[in-house]
Amino acid sequence: MRRLALLGIGNMRLGPITLAAVASFYGERPLEVLLWDADLERLDLMERLGWSLFRTAESPHALTIVETLEDALEVDAAIVLVGRWCVQRAQPDATREEFVSRVVQQFPPTTSVLRLVPTVGERHEDSLDLELPVLSELERQQRAFQTLRWIHGDEPIGPLLEQGESSLIRHWLTAWERNQDPG
């Protein structure tokens, strides 16, 4: 089973669409999807959303929480979407760009890395500009409540899955799988 890490999944702007893209991805083989975030409350919320999305999409992938960043580095591919709350808990003295750059540099050269947030310097990873708006603090809080409504079934989760299916993240997953060696 190939392993995909979603690092900084507690990012309220990028987490839901990333999980929806993975849930709607039906590759050649199921994936083990590793979730990591230094903000454990947001990590828990996104794990619950992930299970709701995977169940609704009848996704064959497995979802696993990893407690340390180091546990998420031995993967075939990674999507880095670290937000400021994650950085504040993981490495308070670093900027987000510095933290993400350090994380990306820890992957082996064979790992395909998609970064959805800025980094300092260059590496072999891809990057995407999803053109999603920056959320205000109020919008961030509202997104958390929206996420709970999706999880509890108070609002349909289908539109989020549709966004994920047509997202650039999903297209990157398809391209990544196409470029993998068989076996």
Image (cartoon, rainbow, N blue to C red):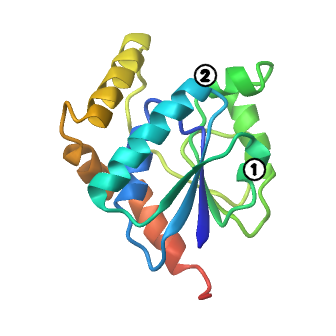
Residue density around tag 1, few if under 14, some if 14–19, many if 20 or more, within 10 Å: few
Foreground of the two, 149 or 159: 149
* Amino acid type, mark 1: Asp
> What residue would you read off at disc 2?
85
* Amino acid marked by disc 2: Trp
Judge the density around disc 2: few (<14), some (14-19), many (≥20) Cα neighbours within 10 Å. some
Does 176 sit above or below residue 47? Answer: below
Q: Quadrant of residue 118?
A: top right
Above/below status of 118 relative to 174: above
What residue lies at 69% left-to-right and 20% top-to-bottom?
A: 88
Q: Quadrant of residue 136?
A: top left
Q: Is residue 23 left or right of residue 29?
A: left
Res 166 seen here: no
Residue beneath the point at 66% across and 67% down = 76
- Give left or right: position of 148 versus 73: left
| Position of residue 153 measured from the top left corner of the image (x, y, whole percent) | 23, 36
Q: Is residue 74 left or right of residue 159?
A: right
Q: Which mark is residue 3?
A: none
Q: Position of residue 180 (x, y in %)?
A: 59, 79
Q: Position of residue 37 (x, y in %)?
A: 63, 35
Q: Which residue is mark 1?
A: 71
Q: Farthest residue toward the top? A: 138
- Count of number-bearing discs: 2
Helix, strand or loop status at disc 2: helix
Q: Secondary structure at mark 1?
A: helix
Residue at coordinates 46% horizontally, 31% vertically from top-left? 45
Closer to the eye: label 1 or 2: 1
Q: Classify 95 as above or below 5.
A: above
